[in-house]
Amino acid sequence: MSTTATDPRMSGARRAPPKGLSLSWSDPRFRAIVWQVVIVGLLVAGVWYLASNTATNLEERRIATGFDFLGRTAGIPIGEHLIPYDPSVHTYGRAVLVGILNTLMVTVVGVALISLLGTVVGIASLSNNWLLSRLCRAYVEGMRDVPLLLHLLFWYAVMLTFPPVRDAISVMPGVFMSNSGLKVPLLIWENAHTGAALAFLGGSVATWFASRRATAIQHATGIRPAVWPVVLVGLVLLPLAVWALMGAPFALDIPVKARFRFNGGATISPEFTALMIGLVLYHSAFAAEIVRSGILSVPTGQWEAGGALGLKRGTMLRMIVLPQALRVIIPPMTSTYLGVAKNSSLAVAIGYPDLVSIVNTTLNQTGQAIEGIAIIMAVYLSISLSISLFMNWYNARIALVER
Amino acid sequence: MATTTTHASVADRAQPPMLVAGPVAWMRANLFSSVWSSLVTLALAYFLIKFTVGLIDWAFLKSVWTVPTDPATGKLNPDACRQAKGEGACWAVIWDKYRFILFGRYPYEEHWRAAIVLVLFLGLFVVSAMRRFWRPVLALIWVAVLVSIFTLMWGGVFGLRYVAQDEWGGLPITLILSTFGLACAFPIAVLVALGRRATNLPAVKLICVIYIEVIRGVPLISLLFMASVMFPLFMPVGLNPDKLLRAQIAIILFAAVYLAEVIRGGLQALPKGQYEAADALGLSYWKKMGLIILPQALRLVIPPLVNTFIGFFKDTSLVLIIGIFDLLTSGKVAVTDPIWQAFSTEVYIMLGLIYFCFCFSMARYSQSLEREFSKSVRR
């Protein structure tokens, strides 16, 4: 339009002429530059002062610097390791790796259990059943108002009140509870099991494709073809057939109680158990609150609309309310997961060999505190970054598509 | 009679609606509304009753409250507790150790000073929670109370005996770490939150973003380790601040980041018009922030701020790992006494109750504030 094109306000003719940077305190740009120079200068000076102090101190105390110690033989005995580890052979580097894997395992198992328990308690606290919802509220209040460290110490103390191995309690055949942990049977793994697992994996892929195709057909014709035959064949029959064809081996390594120790079976240590119970009880209370407030954030009209369509309460929750609540739930849940990863470091207080506890031993032995703490911080920063990147991706995926 | 009116027999008359009010109706609506609901109620009620009966049995009926002193050794004789082990609680350990748990290694005959400190702290919290004291004078009250708390703890003046800092312990340490930490972290947090939103100062913004993201990505323990093993290396040779101060600095740096993010939420939630109106009045940056923006933004985020406070109150317990004598540490040390070694559960339960009382009352307070604020918004 010609009128807008000639509008003097748009043409720039009436705009103030561009001014050069004047060296005057009344020029905001000049002030901004001065302030930044002052602040950055102070920061650099402070860091330089601390660094020079550190250099002097290190020299005076004859502490070595650098990461050479990672290549030396560690000699730290570690009770639980996911990869082979022998203190007399392996290096500090490997010990740190064992710690990282332990931390990751605690985080992954913890996050899974916390999501599960948190969702159940969060939904149950909105139940119509007065007793159930009251108990869930009490659970949340009771668990989250006590420090996590106290949780850990308490559950560890409880774990140690179990009788010694000699009088271990047999929970059910092959499962024993004693003050040195939980003993469970272990499946003796053979090729047939690997084959069955691969078949199961293939079946899952087939199920995924089948359900996609079913959704596409449902969108096109309104009739959803049955998916269950694919599920039955892919997830149950095919793995079973593979396992049977390869000889159907099934042998359990059942722990047998000897006089002072167990032979065979797998051990879940009291440290790990106490850490898991503490982490899950504490954080699931927060997760439950997040789920509850997410569900409450969905307008009542959505429930009523679902009811008008004749859906059952469970279907409404699954198909209508939860997908919408998820958008509110994801961001705070991300913080909870980050909190679980960081709080798994409290394992050091009860002697579970996580990253912090192993690095702590390392820096006590080598005296190289700066390098040790740098390792801890670098690992946790990467874990935190990965979790938040993944959750941001997931959040973007489920976000409401707006016009 | 020509016309006969037939009355329905009593049994055929419509019964008055029986179950619309009263306890029976309430139970039908809330406990037995469907088959599933009834099953859940019955199962929960069964476990609840069983648990409560067991708890009362353990904590009160079969528990041991005191144990006699062994005349031969002059020490307590915990045999009664050992006999009740597994069936009843041994509260005698609390009775014996409560002063150690509350005050740690603080000299026994000076415990009254630590007790006054606790009362001062509680008074400070109560006064700060009352809205009629939300005036500038509150800052003066805080300074005065904190000064008198440190005077009482240290002593050395007014005829009080000097108590070195490494003899402090117990609940006063927990309260000092959390209260003093938050009081110092708060101004830093405000500055960092403002810095992160200062778009015309890119260098300052970058520094604030890095500070926030790095500290938020690492566990508090790593900062405490840093304070306990790296901090001495940072200082000039010969200067070595005591352990409590170092841990306090780590907690302040940590708390400031989380508070800053909460405050940033408040700054973002404020309508843009408020910023523009302040600019239109020609106010300088600090006047704009101090008089217009911050008072409104902080008010918006009081409930999440209180939640952050609760988190930090609990997180101060982590100083146990670097060996500072807070409430949790003194509880843990109390049960290393050979007599009481087997009775740590009772002590941890008592510690849990203390922490619970503080956190629960703060949470309730935050909820009541939230209700009050939402009332004024809705109006």
Image: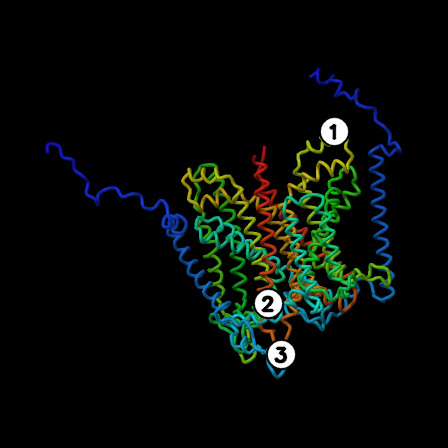
Q: Is residue A224 left or right of residue B67?
A: left
Q: Nearer the viewer, mark 1 or mark 3?
A: 3
- Kindly identify which numbered label has been placed on residue B347: 2
**Same chain for marks 1 and 3?**
yes
Q: Quadrant of the C terminus of chain B?
A: top right
Which quadrant of the view contains residue B289? top right
- Is A121 in front, or is B263? B263
- Amino acid under label 3? Lys
> Is the residue under label 3 in contact with that under label 1 (CB below 8 Å)?
no
**Same chain for marks 1 and 2?**
yes
Which residue, as the protein is rendered here, is positioned at the far top? A3
* In the depicted structure, whether residue B140 falls above or below residue A59: above
- Kindly identify which numbered label has been placed on residue B75: 3
Q: Quadrant of the N terminus of chain B?
A: top left
Q: Position of residue B323 (x, y in %)?
A: 71, 65
- Is A223 in front, or is A402? A402
Q: Which residue is mark 1?
A: B280
Dot 1: element:
helix
Q: Position of residue B18 (x, y in %)?
A: 31, 46
- Amino acid under label 1? Ala
* Total numbered labels placed on residues in the image: 3
